[in-house]
């Protein structure tokens, strides 16, 4: 789902989703959320939509807890070190050296070796054939 679709579906920017989960709760992050308040109410609260006075008061009076929980549901988490995702860099010489060192014969057979060389050059175009399990 891209940013536009997310905004259309939820009415908020994706970066605000942590606020929703900190108010409504997130079981996967161990955040209980506020009792009786789900995602719909949290979304309405954040966007200024219709929220009953009792639920609005509950959210307003729980800002300290909500801010604490938001630290658990927002990514990147403060304990996660940033990293870059890059295209894998294949090195056929290292691959075949590894195969030879560990005596992985099937990768060293001439026909298979030619296929792997094509793969490393990027010219395989999805033609890798996997054996089906019997």
Image: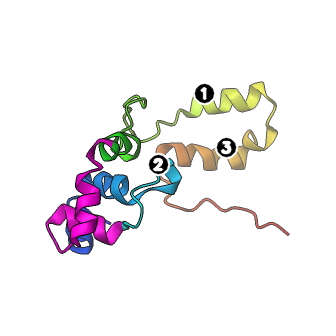
The residues bearing labels 2 and 1 have C-alpha atoms spaced at a distance of: 16 Å
Q: Which residue is mark 1?
A: 94
At label 1, counting other C-alpha atoms closer than 10 Å, the crowd grade (few under 14, some 14-19, many 20 or more) is: few
| Residue 111 relative to residue 65: left or right | right
Q: Secondary structure at mark 3?
A: helix
Q: Residue at x 28, y 66 (%)?
A: 55
**Left or right: residue 27 compared with residue 62:** right
| Quarter where residue 58 is shown | bottom left
Q: Name the N-terminal-most of marks 2 and 1.
A: 1
Mark 2 Cα within 10 Å, few/some/many (few <14, many 20+)?
A: few
Q: Give the label on residue 74, or none.
A: none
Q: Is residue 3 magenta?
A: no
At numbered mark 1, what does the secondary structure look like: helix, strand or loop? Answer: helix
Q: Nearer the viewer, residue 20 or 60?
A: 60
Mark 2, residue position: 122
Q: Is 60 in the magenta?
A: yes
Q: Is residue 8 above or below residue 106?
A: below
- Magenta range: 39-64
Q: Mark 3 and mark 1 in contact? Answer it, CB < 8 Å.
A: no
What residue is disc 3 on? 113
Is residue 4 in sight in this rendering? Answer: no
Q: Position of residue 61 (x, y in %)?
A: 26, 51
Where is residue 64? Give x, y as percent: 29, 41
């Amino acid at each position: 789902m891209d940013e536009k679709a997310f905004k259309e579906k939820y009415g908020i920017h994706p970066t605000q989703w942590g606020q929703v989960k900190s108010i409504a709760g997130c079981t996967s992050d161990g955040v209980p959320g506020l009792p009786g308040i789900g995602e719909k109410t949290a979304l309405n609260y954040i966007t200024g939509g219709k929220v009953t006075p009792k639920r609005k008061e509950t959210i307003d009076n729980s800002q300290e807890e909500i801010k604490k929980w938001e630290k658990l549901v927002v990514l990147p988490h403060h304990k996660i070190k940033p990293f870059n995702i890059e295209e894998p860099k294949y090195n056929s010489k290292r691959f075949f050296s590894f195969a030879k060192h560990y005596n992985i014969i099937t990768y060293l057979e001439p026909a298979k070796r030619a296929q792997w060389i094509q793969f490393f050059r990027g010219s395989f175009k999805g033609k890798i054939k996997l054996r089906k399990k019997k």
